[in-house]
Image: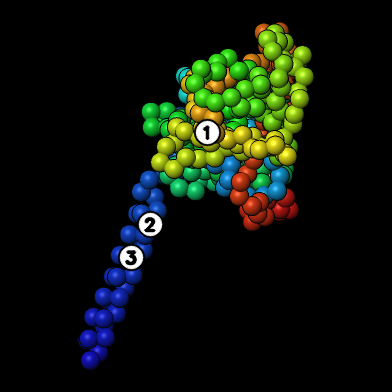
Amino acid sequence: MKNLKLLLGFAFIATLFTSCYVEETNYIDEPPMSLNQLLNSYDLWYVDINSTQGYGETPFLQIAFTVSFNNGRMYANNNLVGFGSQGNGYGVEIGNYDAYDMVLDVNHIIDGYDSFDVYQVDNNTIELYNPFNDTSYFLEGYQRSNFDYDFIFYDNIHYFLQEYEAWEKTYTSNFGTLNDFDNENYIQFLSGGNDDTFRSSQDENLYNTNDIFWDFTGGYGVGDVSGNMYLKTLTLDYDFFDNEFFELSVINDSTVELFHANSGTVYEFKGRGYIQYYRNENAEGKAAKQAEAPKKRKQKTKKVENTRENKRNIQE
């Protein structure tokens, strides 16, 4: 019995040392990549606005569809016009950054300095925690070759409608019955606020969009068509009049087609006065003028309290 106990004791000790050795090997098998390597591991980081946690906002992340990091320079796709082609898919340069010790410091060209604690959620997801407003943004990494620009474009198409000061009717089909919408020649989709306000005008052949007299202001909505990502519905609410219902198709970055369901008439509208949601500097180094009511992506999910601990406020 004594010999058996000794053998069992040796076996237990051997197992214990073997177990410790394996755990240590797994721990040091592959050192973690640096933050700069992590940020550069993907061409595009999609800002999943609906996953945001916290009640604050970081302006340049709130308007961006994607951001990119390249050798200290930061890029963003803030517009859907030119999405996928502008800046070879990266968008426009919005500032500089420094990455160290899982801290990301950003010097935005207009917004100035901001800083984030970075957490790697999984292989292609990172969390940017802003300790100044206690809000976390979640970014998903993609390469340009496998990023679905079309899906993002059509999933956010109401922002596309807001990227022009006005849409001018340039074509009306010679088929379809007469209807009240035949008299509408300009439509405007306003950014900001509730993101659902439109204006219409019966003015004709105006060169300057600032000269348009808007006859009516109402609400609008963009909806999906089951089984067809490239076709949307557009409803214009004319209050006590009947709603105008259309099938909306995008012809190119500046032209849309509206099929009026009730009359069978097809209209084409062309964008006038492109609004570039890019806080840029012009050739003279001065800040370029921004739109009076800048587009801001709205979080469709309910805002929740951020449970992330603000480590920079801890007194050591």
Looking at the image, is 253 positioned above or below residue 128?
above
Q: Amino acid at mark 1?
A: Ala
Residue occupied by mark 3? 19
Residue receiving disc 2: 24
Is 221 on the left-hand or right-hand side of 45? Answer: right
Label 2: element kind: helix
Q: CA distance from mark 1 to mark 3?
A: 71 Å
| Residue 280 position in % (x across, y down) | 66, 18
How far across and how far down the image is residue 194, in percent? 71, 39
Within 10 angstroms of label 3, few (less than 14), some, or many (20 or more) residues? few
Q: Is residue 40 visible?
A: no
**C-beta proximity under 8 Å, tags 1 and 3:** no
N-term mark: 1 or 3? 3
Helix, strand or loop at mark 3: helix
Type of residue at label 3?
Ser
> Tag 1 or tag 2, which sits nearer the N-term?
2
Q: Is residue 13 left or right of residue 153?
A: left
Q: Is residue 222 left or right of residue 29?
A: right
Q: Residue at x 36, y 48 (%)?
A: 29
Quarter assignment of residue 221: top right
Q: Please count the marks in the image.
A: 3
Q: Determine crowd level at label 1: few under 14, some 14-19, many 20+ residues with C-alpha closer than 10 A.
A: few
Q: Position of residue 294 (x, y in %)?
A: 70, 28
The answer to which image quadrant residue 92 occupies is top right
Task: Tell me which residue sits at (57%, 47%) in the image.
Answer: 51
Separation (CA) of disc 2 from disc 3? 9 Å
Depth check, front residue: 112 or 138: 138
* Residue at image mark 1: 261
Determine the residue positioned at 63% across, 17% down. 168
